[in-house]
Amino acid sequence: QSALTQPPSASGSPGQSVAISCTGTSSDVGGYNYVSWYQHHPGKAPKLMIYEVSKRPSGVPDRFSGSKSGNTASLTVSGLQAEDEADYYCSSYAGSNTYVFGTGTKVTVL
Amino acid sequence: QVQLQQWGTGLLNPSETLSLTCAVYGGSFSPYYWFWIRQPPGKGLEWIGEIHHSGSTSYNSSLKSRVTMSLDTSKNHFSLRLTSVTAADTALYYCARGGLPGGFDYWGQGTLVTVSS
């Protein structure tokens, strides 16, 4: 179970959009529509932002959106706000009741 | 409102056994999967394993020989045991609920476990 690949960092100015990629294989991201995304502020528990590739849990702003193409999933944060500055992790079901996380991306709001 | 509250030993010597428990408040054990996830200092999240409300388990292959998860439905608790710990097991450990398809929707507050002699 190798970690999914994410860019180490991404940034944008307030109001702009930032997109984060999450690249796996046909055994995880490409094989199942069970990709989720988490926002993690240091010292707090991670928060689920997207599940099943593109669905938002109740209470998550529609500024957060997810998509997938082949073995790569993406999270887009539109209309960046200061509170969006955090680490973001993707996760994917990897078959046989196992999961794998991404390497994490630090999003900076300039 | 579902809340997960976790506790356990925070400082271990190498070769000892890590033991953590997560209590579920405000919700039922059934029909969910329950998870343990960890984050070593300065690193990313790592999936440790899952336990279904029926008691069936699945573990990360890299930890499988040392991990045991169990649950006590009468107390709404589930637990993690990790044997023969080393410094590489030093991490912030989280419990979580799999309440949405493929998504961990509720998380515990995290427990820092340090392995050091």
Image (cartoon, coloured by chain):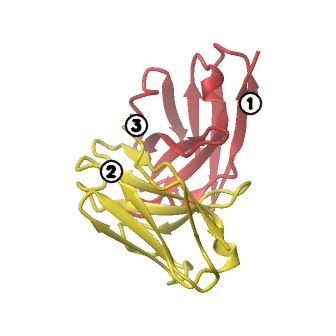
Residue B61, x across and y down, in percent: 38, 30
Q: Nearer the viewer, residue B23 or A108?
A: A108
Write down the residue under mark 1. B9
Q: Nearer the viewer, residue A50 or B9?
A: A50
- Tell me how far mark 1 sits from mark 2, CA to CA: 35 Å
Circle 2: residue type = Gly
Circle 3: residue type = Thr
Tag 2 subunit: A
Circle 1: residue type = Thr
Determine which of the numbered discs, if any, sits on residue B57 in the image.
3
> Which hue is chain A drawn in?
yellow
- The quadrant of the picture occupied by the N terminus of chain A is top left
> Which hue is chain B drawn in?
red
Q: Identify the residue at horizontal 42%, vertical 39% (top origin).
A: B55
2 and 3 marks in contact (CB < 8 Å): no
Q: Identify the residue at horizontal 41%, vertical 50% (top origin).
A: A5
- Is A34 left, or right, of B77 in this rendering? left
Q: Identify the residue at horizontal 60%, vertical 80% (top origin).
A: A80
Q: Residues within 10 Å of mark 1 (few under 14, many from 20)?
A: some
Residue A79, x across and y down, in percent: 57, 85
